[in-house]
Image (tube, helix red, strand yellow):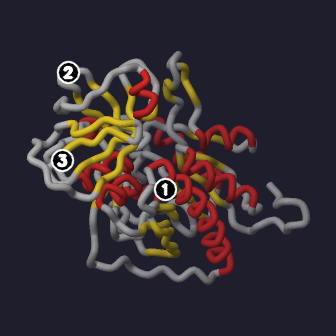
Amino acid sequence: MSGPQGQAPRRLRVAFAGTPEFAAQALRAILQAGFTVPLVLTQPDRPAGRGLKLQASAVKQVAQTAQIAVQQPLGLRLDGRHAEQAAQTHAALREAAPDVLVVAAYGLILPQSVLGLPRLGCVNIHASLLPRWRGAAPIQRAIEAGDARTGITLMQMDAGLDTGAVLLEQAVDITATDTAASLHDRLAALGAELIVRGLDALEAGTLQPHPQPEQGVSYAAKISKTESALDWTQPAETLARRVRAFSPWPGTQCALADGTMIKVGAAEALAPTATQAAPGAVLLMQPAGLDVQCGQGILRVTRLQRPGGTMQSVAQWLQGGTDLTGQTLA
């Protein structure tokens, strides 16, 4: 595969492993920069949409458009449950003979047998400033924790969980209104930009890895649907961050007095005021929002959703005539 018009072909052969849109943006950037991509690894097609039809991952769709060979194994361990598929993928990697394997939100752990295949090893695009937020959900956990900044780290992969040497990194601020979706989009664009810079430096022999600091290690546990319930005994600031961190998935929710579950789409913490209300009490519902007493402070919910309905503003909700003032949410 040659580079874009007027650009000399790159020397590096870059295999790629990734699945969602975050990774697809990086793959597009690698292709646009003119690197040869002989093979792509991605997760198997999954049911999606209302019809639950099998759908190719975002990365697979990019690969198919670019006519790149694709492997979709269920596992990569040669001694695991899916050893036959793993062996086929190992053989495909050896035949592709990549100089480097770029990995971004792939979804499978790479065993040493894969890590050692490319001549220059494997480079991971990770959505945090390592060693903070190693693991599966760094974007959500950074917002939930109230971090002021995060970023993208290019890491030389080893057998540990995001423990490899740092190759490049760049920070971004987390704004007071960032959701997981908005921060994801900024970091995906930055990851795409940084991986091209990293591959340029790798090709030129100027990339200098350095070990991660021993201090500041934290782990971003995978998000569970069970975390979506809002606990009104917590501070309003904590709940506001959780609403933003879990938007759009898995979302946040609470129960009305009759047990009806409603989804909370957006909320903000208000300045604390003196009140004797118990946590969960709806102090006021007006077009500007639904004010709920928390363990500390008041959470103003500005968007919510009835079961089977669509997400709407509180002003739209009130047009239906349901004023929740005086109710206690669970």
Instruction: Please state which of the two labelled residues, at mark 2 or mark 1, is closer to the viewer.
Output: 2
Looking at the image, tell me whether mark 2 or mark 1 is earlier in sequence order: 1
Give the SS element for disc 2.
loop
Looking at the image, tell me whether mark 3 or mark 1 is earlier in sequence order: 1
Give the SS element for disc 1.
helix
Instruction: Please state which of the two labelled residues, at mark 3 or mark 1, is closer to the viewer.
Output: 3
Question: What label sits on residue 183 in the rendered view?
Answer: 1
Instruction: Please state which of the two labelled residues, at mark 2 or mark 3, is closer to the viewer.
Output: 3
Tags 3 and 1 in contact by the CB under 8 Å rule? Answer: no
Residue visible at 14% across and 55% down? 274
Comparing 111 with 309, the one in front is 309
Question: What label sits on residue 259 in the rendered view?
Answer: 2
Question: What label sits on residue 205 in the rendered view?
Answer: none
Quadrant where the image shows the C terminus: top left
> In this image, 165 relative to 324: left or right?
right
Residue annotated with mark 3: 294
| Amino acid type at mark 2 | Gly
